[in-house]
Each structure stands twice: as structure tokens, then as C-alpha cells.
Image (cartoon, rainbow, N blue to C red):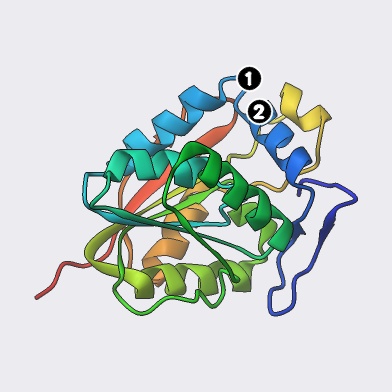
Amino acid sequence: MFETTGHSAAPGTTGIVLHRAFWYDAFVWLVSLGREHSYREKTLDLAGLKPGESILDIGCGTGTLAIAAKRRVGAAGRVYGVDASPEMLARAGKKADKAGAEVVFQNGIVEALPFPDGQFDAVLSTVMLHHLGRKARLQRANEVRRVLKPGGRVLAVDFAPPAKGKRGLLDHFHHHGYLNIQDLVSLLAQAGLNAARSGAVGMGDLYFVLATAPAAT
């Protein structure tokens, strides 16, 4: 897990919650190897966002991805970001105001998302699953399934275990956890989400899984 003096367990969650917004932005820059804009746009490409869609970014941090998602879905689309850290959300709100982006940021935990059933066309989950234990990961997957519309999709991005005996530059700066891609596919399947695509993001040890909820019958 990414270690910093500004993290804690938030009430109601067993996961690690990051509170130092400045360090979070520095961490994202590091994860993307200084190519944050490219990483963000590649993530949104993988999610296949379309104008007019309703999007949720869980563990949204300081809101950069949610703001970029709003540009993709346009004026007719809605974007929400949820995070357990009020400090992160305060910075996210300031960023959105500066960008002139209408994004709704809410305080909440991924084990119990503060949204009704079937609200979103797509859910984004980037580099946050490794902060959760196994039970919380399954709760999070079930919650994602609940808030997705029939046929909706979820994009999960996280760290793959490094090759045996190999450590990348990122490993020397923090001690994050890893999540095997097969385990993630299995976890999503347990929640009723079917993996459609998976593979390397193309930056560091990051990989993605794109999964879909069953279509309406």
C-alpha cells in the first residue's frame, strides 16, 4: 500500500484512506511516469465514455479523472466522484470550479456507495483496489454492480505484481499492494460482472479489466 503520514482508516471502511491531497497528485504523476495527461486520456478511452452518459469515479481522490470524464460526456452527461477523504474532495471541488466543470463530489465509502440502484452507465476505479482487503474488495464489487445500469460497464485499473526478481522505479518510492489480474476477474465475476477486456495499460505495472453488467431482459 502507498504509505504516507496522511492516511488512516475512515469510519465504516476497512481500507486505507489517503488524506494528503498534494502528495496524492504527486503520486499520480509518479505512477504515470510524468505522463498524467496521457494516462488519464488512455483510461477514459478504455472505459469508452460517450456523450450524455452518467459516470461514477470511485476513490476519486483530487478529482482530475472525474473532471476529464465530464469533458467526455459533455453538458448532457453527469459525473460523480466519491471518496472517503474530505481533504481530497475539497481539493477536487476547487479543481472543478477552476476548470468550469460541473462534477458532483460526495463523501462516502466504496463498501456502501451513496447512490441508488442502476444510476450509472460506467464506473471508474483506478489504483484504489489495492488499498482494500479481500472482503472489502468483494463488497465494493457488489456495490458497483448495484449502481450500474443494465449493460453498464466498470473499468478497474491497478498494479500487477512485478516479474519475479524485478522491481520498477515506482517500487522504490512507496509500498503499494498488488492485485493479480485473474483474481480481479474472478472477484468481478462473483459480483455478477463479466470481464470483456483486460491487459496492460502501457504505463509501468498498471493493468486494466473492463467488465459489464448483465443487459436487461
Q: Residue at x 59, y 71 (%)?
A: 108
Q: What element carries label 2?
A: helix
Is 24 positioned to the left or the right of 72 in the image?
right
The answer to which of 24 and 201 lies nearer the viewer is 24
Q: Does residue 105 appear anywhere in the picture?
A: yes
Is 73 positioned to the left or the right of 101 in the image?
left
Is 16 positioned to the left or the right of 77 in the image?
right
Do labels 2 and 1 touch, CB within 8 Å? Answer: yes
Give me the disc on residue 29: 2
| x then y, percent, for residue 157 | 50, 44
The answer to which of 1 and 187 lies nearer the viewer is 1
The answer to which of 17 and 86 lies nearer the viewer is 86
Q: Residue at x 61, y 47 (%)?
A: 94
* The quadrant where residue 122 appears: bottom left
Amino acid type shown at disc 1: Gly
Q: Does residue 202 appear anywhere in the picture?
A: no
> Does residue 128 lie above or below 114 as drawn?
above
Amino acid type shown at disc 2: Trp
Q: Is mark 1 on a helix, strand or loop?
A: loop
Count the marks: 2
Q: Which residue in the rendered view is the most extreme toward the left?
A: 217
Give me the disc on residue 34: 1
Closer to the N terminus: mark 2 or mark 1?
A: 2
> Does residue 86 lie above or below 39 as drawn?
below
**Crowding near the residue tagged with mark 2, few <14, some 14–19, many ≥20 C-alpha atoms within 10 Å:** some
> Does residue 41 lie above or below 95 as drawn?
above
* The quadrant where residue 45 appears: top left
**Crowding near the residue tagged with mark 1, few <14, some 14–19, many ≥20 C-alpha atoms within 10 Å:** few
Q: Which residue in the rendered view is the most extreme toward the right?
A: 5
Q: Residue at x 21, y 67 (%)?
A: 214
Q: Which residue is drawn at 47% across and 23% down?
A: 38
Instruction: Quadrant for the C terminus, please.
Output: bottom left
